[in-house]
Amino acid sequence: IDEYYPGEPKRVLLVSLPARCNVLAHTDCGYHLETCHRIHVPIITNDKVLFLCNGVQVPMAAGSLVDFNNNTQHEVINRSLHDRIHLIIDWGKKNDPYYME
């Protein structure tokens, strides 16, 4: 990741979206989310899970690394019978004086 974005991981999350559940359209805000790249690494997913950014489907194949602008509107629709699991890495500047742990 640091080949493209100088920095370090600021937060790492393992997130499960239960079967047939959705994440409503939203934009991420706040200093942390506005100054980090939010990178998704889909671990368990399938073709019935839709990730939309500004209404456009973003490919999220298992094992891929996806960086998108989380300050734009995005949503997730899980139409499958299986949970979706993503590793999410918030990548930011090293030694950010305003970053609060």
Image: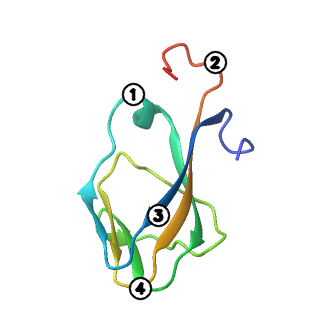
Amino acid at dot 2: Asn
Residue 80 locus on image (x, y percent): 39, 85
Q: Could you give the CA–CA distance between mark 1 and mark 3, rounded to whole angstroms?
A: 24 Å
At 48% across and 16% down in the image, what residue appears?
98
Amino acid at dot 1: Tyr
Amino acid at dot 3: Ser
Q: Of tags 2 and 4, which is closer to the observer? A: 4
Q: Earlier in the sequence, mark 1 or mark 4?
A: 1
The local crowd at label 2, few if under 14, some if 14 to 19, many if 20 or more residues have their Cα within 10 Å, is few
Q: Earlier in the sequence, mark 1 or mark 2?
A: 1
- The colour style of the image is rainbow
The local crowd at label 3, few if under 14, some if 14 to 19, many if 20 or more residues have their Cα within 10 Å, is few
Q: Which residue is mark 4?
A: 48
Q: Which residue is mark 1?
A: 31
Amino acid at dot 4: Lys
Residue 56 locus on image (x, y percent): 35, 71
Q: Could you give the CA–CA distance between mark 2 and mark 3, rounded to whole angstroms?
A: 30 Å
Q: Of helix, strand and loop, which one carries label 1?
A: helix
Q: Which mark is residue 16?
A: 3
- The image quadrant of residue 8 is top right
Q: Of tags 1 and 3, which is closer to the observer? A: 3
At 43% across and 50% down in the image, what residue appears?
69
Q: Of helix, strand and loop, which one carries label 2?
A: loop
In the rendered view, would you say 36 is above or below 14? above
Q: Of helix, strand and loop, which one carries label 4?
A: loop
Q: Is residue 34 left or right of residue 61?
A: left
